[in-house]
Image (cartoon, rainbow, N blue to C red):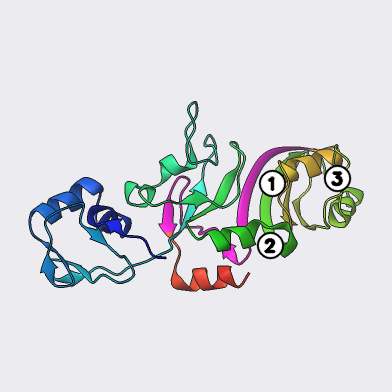
């Protein structure tokens, strides 16, 4: 059953402004609900039924939000932590007021694509092992990657705890003292990419997630920047 929501919270969630800003709008008699001026911030509305407008302009109701972040190093993939900054700290306040959570985790020292949403069913499908959603990484490793290394990664490696990973896709980009490669995996074990390379005697010195399912990191996003997904990106992601 749909729950009532405070008018100021509804407006903040719909990104009309911060809680302080939307309270000022309400006090100024600039907000209507079903055609009636409402000047109390705690007025209850049913989001999917109420016709809310600000200065006569309807406020479109959106149940789910989808945000892409280009995660930099140094941030935990969590919503809060007492001792370290989290990826949620990187989002603008207009999105932090939503009940958004990162879909999966990136290590503190890993960069790249991180999706935030309040769409629980989609999060579950992207992360559940049985759906085997592809996740592609760019990585640099110490030491030269050999053909036997590539074959082992492609066939699935045995990790230090005895678990055998699913077969992966590997593309060698550059060989040398510091090798570069692109690795696509279909599961998400703890520190999996680093552990896979360790299993073939290599240490990862840089790691960036490039894609998850049909969603690819926007090359125009600088580290720490974020944006909403387009309708087309959302549709592709849901079809992953």
Residue located at (83% from left, 58% from top): 167
Residues at marks 1 and 2, CA–CA distance in whole angstroms: 19 Å
Q: Secondary structure at mark 3?
A: loop
Residue marked by disc 2? 133
The residue lying toward the viewer, choosing from 208 and 63, is: 63
Q: Residue furthest right?
A: 148
Among the two numbered marks 2 and 3 on one chain, the one whose residue lies closer to the N terminus = 2
Q: Residue at x 52, y 42 (%)?
A: 72
Residue depicted at 62% across the width and 51% down the height = 209
Q: What residue sits right under mark 1 in the picture?
A: 139
Whether residue 110 is in magenta: the answer is no
Residue 11: percent from the left, percent from the top? 26, 58
Q: Is residue 236 above or below residue 135?
A: below
Sequence-wise, the earlier of marks 1 and 3 is 1
Q: Position of residue 76 (x, y in %)?
A: 54, 37
Can residue 216 be seen by looking at this rendering? no
**How far is the residue under mark 2 from the one under mark 3?**
19 Å
Q: Where does the magenta region start and end?
A: 203-227
Q: Is residue 125 left or right of residue 53?
A: right
| Residue 240 image point, x, y percent | 63, 69
What residue is pinned by disc 3?
Answer: 163
Badge 1 local density, few (<14 within 10 Å), some, or many (20+)?
many
Q: Secondary structure at mark 1?
A: strand
Residue beneath the point at 45% across and 51% down: 100
């Amino acid at each position: 059953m749909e729950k009532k929501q405070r008018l100021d919270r509804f407006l903040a969630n719909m990104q009309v402004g911060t809680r302080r800003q939307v309270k000022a709008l309400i006090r100024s008699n600039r907000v209507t609900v079903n055609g009636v001026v409402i000047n109390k911030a705690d007025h209850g509305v049913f989001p999917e039924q109420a016709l809310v407008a600000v200065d006569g302009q309807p406020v479109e109701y959106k149940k789910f939000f989808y945000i892409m972040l280009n995660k930099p190093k140094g941030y935990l993939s969590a919503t809060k932590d007492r001792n370290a900054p989290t990826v949620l700290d990187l989002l603008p306040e207009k999105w932090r007021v939503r009940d958004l959570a990162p879909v999966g985790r990136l290590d503190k020292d890993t960069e790249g694509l991180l999706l935030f949403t309040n769409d629980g069913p989609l999060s579950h499908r992207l992360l559940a092992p049985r759906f085997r959603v592809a996740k592609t990484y760019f990585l640099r490793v110490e030491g030269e990657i050999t053909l036997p290394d590539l074959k082992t990664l492609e066939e699935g490696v045995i990790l230090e705890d005895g678990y055998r990973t699913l077969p992966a896709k590997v593309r060698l980009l550059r060989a040398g003292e510091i090798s570069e490669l692109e690795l696509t995996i279909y599961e998400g074990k703890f520190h999996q990419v680093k552990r896979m390379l360790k299993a073939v005697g290599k240490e990862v010195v840089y790691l960036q997630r490039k894609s998850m399912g049909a969603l690819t990191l926007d090359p125009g996003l600088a580290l720490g920047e974020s944006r909403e997904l387009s309708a087309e990106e959302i549709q592709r992601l849901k079809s992953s």
